[in-house]
Amino acid sequence: MLTCQQASQLISQSLDHPLSWYELMQLRLHLMMCGACNRFRKQLNVLLVGLRKIRTNIENDSAIQLPLDAKTRIVEKLKSNQHSQ
């Protein structure tokens, strides 16, 4: 059985890459019994959706009057933050 710390690490890792079958089964079992880790997973997903919306808005909004290199740096920073979480 996973601890909450191990489960939260797997939840975070699952945002960056697919989990192994064994990791996924362990995590699903833990999430069935742990409301706190379930809330953590849902909160991370909300943040991820928000970051994606921000990135899309920055990339596609011609009203944002930033130099192209500044927009690129912002988008890259959002992408790197997304992968490091």
Image (cartoon, helix red, strand yellow):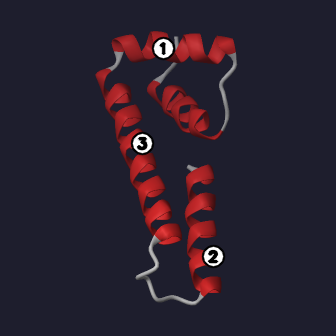
Q: State how far apart marks 1 and 3 are (Cα).
A: 16 Å
**Secondary structure beneath disc 2?**
helix
Residue ID for mark 1: 28
| Residue type (three-letter) at the residue carrying disc 1 | Arg
Q: Position of residue 72 (x, y in %)?
A: 63, 76
Label placed on residue 72: 2
First of labels 3, 2 by sequence position: 3
What residue is at 51 percent from the left and 88 percent from the top? 66
User: Considering depth in this image, is 40 or 80 the residue closer to the camera?
Assistant: 80
What residue is at 61 percent from the left and 52 percent from the top? 84
User: Considering depth in this image, is 45 or 41 the residue closer to the camera?
Assistant: 45
Residue ID for mark 3: 44
Q: State how far apart marks 3 and 2 are (Cα).
A: 24 Å
Residue 24 relative to residue 54: left or right: right
**Secondary structure beneath disc 1?**
helix
Position of residue 2 relative to residue 76, above or below, is above
Q: Position of residue 54 (x, y in %)?
A: 43, 63
